[in-house]
Image (cartoon, rainbow, N blue to C red):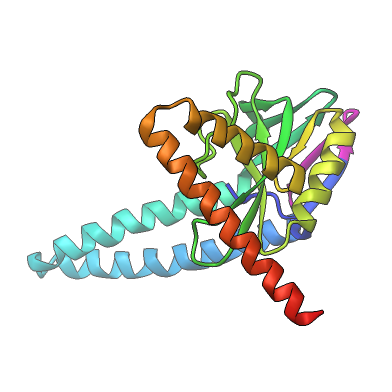
Amino acid sequence: MRLMNPSVLDIWRRDGRLRTTPAPLWARKQAITMWIICTLVASVALYVVSAAQHRPDLWGLATFLAANGASFTWGAVWLSFGRHEWKLEKGRLVLQRRFDANRTTRFEAVALELTEDSSGDDGITYQLAAVAPNASPRPHSHRAGRHRRIIHSQTDDATGPRRFGLWLSQRCQVPFADMTSTEAKAKQLEDLKQQLAASGRIGRLALRFIEASLVRARAGTNKILHRTS
């Protein structure tokens, strides 16, 4: 969920707590746009339904437009009266679904972590995630899973997510693990080597391949540095 972008956040104090939600102006523009689309689709649907009274072959199109009109209407209502918001408290972050005055807790987190995802076509994406109390160590896959929620993500630059994570960590007094640092990457690589070494013959072969690749990469880097010096 890419809800938390500092450029579109409104942070205010209410009842002694801080809540972070999309900025009202940004959310209002989305709602207005959806209502305009809803009105256009509904108008076309009503026209086609009226025409279908005399042309039965139009009922299929009328049904399709009516269904889409209902979907757009619900989307407009949700953007006008509902949202997901993070409630910041001491020792935890609470994701809640809010519709008008009703609130439902959807997720609770007691830690934060910053990771990088290189699986996309747009380069490296840095993801700030909120971590649930019962979460296991993050797997090597790039999926957040059930016990994590992406708060903020940014492509090619970890500065924004890192600063946001540090601020949230200090505000809520929860741990913040920066998995993009050189030390963290070195530890992850060492853990992977140990797992491969203990996983049998195929794992040991994979470990040798990784170590050989690292040696070649270091040699290439040293050669480039030697040429530029």
Q: Is residue 182 above or below residue 199?
A: below
- Magenta-highlighted residues: 13-22
Outermost residue on the bottom side: it is: 228
Q: Is residue 29 magenta?
A: no
| Residue 30 position within the rendered picture, expressed as x and y whole percent measured from the top left | 61, 61
Q: Which one is in front, 42 or 222?
A: 222
Query: Residue visible at 19% across and 70% down?
Result: 51
Q: Is residue 35 found left or right of 204 in the rendered image?
A: right
Please name whichever residue, 83 or 128, is drawn nearer the observer in this view of the structure. 128
Q: Residue 225: x percent and y percent? A: 75, 73
Quadrant that contains the C terminus? bottom right
- Res 95 seen here: yes
Residue located at (62% from left, 68% from top): 220
Residue 99 shows in the view? no
The reply, left or right, for residue 38 in relation to residue 106 is: left
Q: On the picture, is 179 further left or further right than 60?
A: right
Main secondary structure along the magenta-highlighted residues: strand
